[in-house]
Amino acid sequence: MKNGEATSRIDMIKTLKEKGYTLLDLKEVSAEALKKTGTGNINFSLEFGVSEKSIVLFTRQFASTLNAGIPILRCLTILRKQSTSNALRKILLKVDEDIQMGKTLYEAMKEHSSTFSRLYLSTIRVGETSGSLPKVMNQLADSLEARFELKRNVKEAMSYPVFILIFSGVMVFLMIKYLLPTFTPIFENSGLDIPRDYPVTQFLINIGNIAQKIWIIPLIIAIILLIYGIYRLVIHFPKSKIVLDKLIFFFPFFQGFIQMEIFASISSTMGLLISSGVPMLESIRLCADSSNNLFVSNSLLKVQGLLEKGTRLSGAMNKVEIFPLIMLQMVQIGEETGSLDRSFNSTALYFRRELQGSLGAITSLVQPVMMIFVGVAVFFFVMGVFLPIMGISQAYQKQM
C-alpha cells in the first residue's frame, strides 16, 4: 500500500479490516479510469438541488418500504434506483455509505441539511431513538404531502389571475405600440379636434408616442429588475424582512388565505412533532424554523419564551395575539384532555378545508372578473379608435 493505493486485493482487505470497515464489494480501477475521474479534469454538472416534490415522494416511498419490514439500507438502495432526481440519488448514495460506516440514519442525513430540514431531521432522530421509525416516517409523509398539496392548490388558484394580468398587459402594450400608429396619421390629418372631442383617443395617442420610444422596453425591464433587486435586498436583512412578512400576513383582502395557509402549516407541524414524541419547547422552536414568514417565526419564539416561564401553551398563544380563536380553543381542549397532537391535527384539517373552500370560491369569482377586466381594456382601445373613425365618416358625409 502506497499513497492510499493498494498493491493487491489482500492488502486492501487487511487495511480495511484494521480500520474497522466491512468490505461489501471490490472492483479494480484502471489507470485510464483514474485519469478520467482525477482532480485534473473539470466535470460540468447542472444541479439545482432537490425539489420539494422529490422530497415528498421519497418520504412516502421510504415510509412504505419501512412499514413493509425492509431494512433501511435496502430501502435506500431501492429508492435510489427508482428516483428520477440525479441530485437526490447522489445524496442517498452518500447516506447509504455513511450508514455502512456506522452512522445512524439521522447522522447520515444531517450531513445534507440543505436538503433535509431541521424539522425533517428531528423527526428522524425521534423515530430512531424511540424505535418507531416506520410509524414516524409515515406521519412525516402525511404531513409533508398535506403541506405540499396545500401550497400547490394556492399556486394554482393564483396562477390564473396572474396569467390574465400579464396577458392583458402585453396585449394592450402591443396594440398601442404597433396597431395604434397605423391610425394616428389618419386622425391627425382628419381636421378633427382630437384633444377636445376625443379625449380617450388623445390619451391612447400620447401613450402610443411614449411606447414608440426605443428606450421604453429596456426601461420596463430595468424597472422590473430594480423591483426584484429591492425585494431581494429587503429579505436579506432580518429587520426589513420582518416588516415585509408582517405586511404580507395582514395584507388586505388576501390575509384570510395567507393566514389560513400559515395556521394549517403550524398545526400540521405541531401535530406531527408532538405525536412523534418531540418535547413541547423543541416542537415550538422547530415549528418556528420551518416557517417562511419571519414575523410568524418570531411570534412562535415568543410563545416558546412564555412556555419557559411556566405559561400554558394556550395562554402563551393567546398573549401573542396572532392566533385565531378556533385554534386557541382547540389547543385548550387538547391540553385539558391530554391529546394535543390530535387537537393540532384536527385544527390543521379544519384550516385546510376552509382554505380549499375559499380558494374554490375566489377562483370562481376571479375568472369572470378577469374576463371583464380584459373586455374593458379591449373596449377602451376599440372605442378610442372607432369613435374618431365615425367622426371622420360623418364629416365626409356632410361635405358630400
Image (spheres, rainbow, N blue to C red):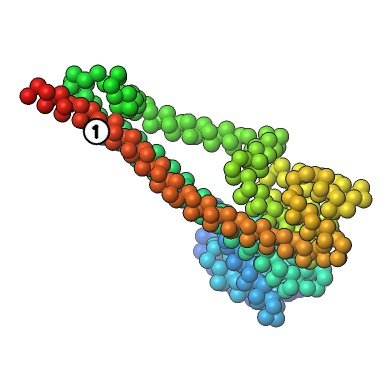
**Residue reaching furthest front?**
398
Which residue is at 54% across, 36% downward? 228
Mark 1 nearby-residue class (10 Å; few <14, some 14–19, many ≥20)? few
Which residue is at 15% across, 24% downward? 395
Q: Amino acid at mark 1?
A: Phe
Q: Is 249 on the left or on the right of 124, as rendered? A: left
- Asked if 181 appears above or below 254 in the picture, the reply is above
- Asked if 321 appears above or below 208 in the picture, the reply is below
Q: Splitting the image into 4 quarters, where does residue 346 fall?
A: bottom right
Nearer to us in this view, 136 or 399: 399
Q: Is residue 145 visible?
A: yes
Where residue 319 appears, as percent x and y from the top left, is: 83, 45
Where residue 398 appears, as percent x and y from the top left, is: 11, 23
Where residue 178 appears, as percent x and y from the top left, is: 27, 34
Quarter of the rendering occupied by the C terminus: top left
Residue under label 1: 386
**Residue reaching furthest right?**
310
Q: How many marks?
A: 1
- Asked if 70 appears above or below 43 in the picture, the reply is below
Which residue is at 66% across, 49% downward? 259
Quarter of the rendering occupied by the N terminus: bottom right
**Residue reaching furthest left?**
400
Which residue is at 40% across, 30% downward? 218
Nearer to us in this view, 153 or 293: 153
**Label 1's element?**
helix
Q: Splitting the image into 4 quarters, where does residue 275 fall?
A: bottom right
Where residue 157 appears, as percent x and y from the top left, is: 52, 53
Q: Is 19 on the left or on the right of 1, as rendered? A: right
Q: Is residue 2 visible?
A: no
Nearer to us in this view, 304 or 380: 380
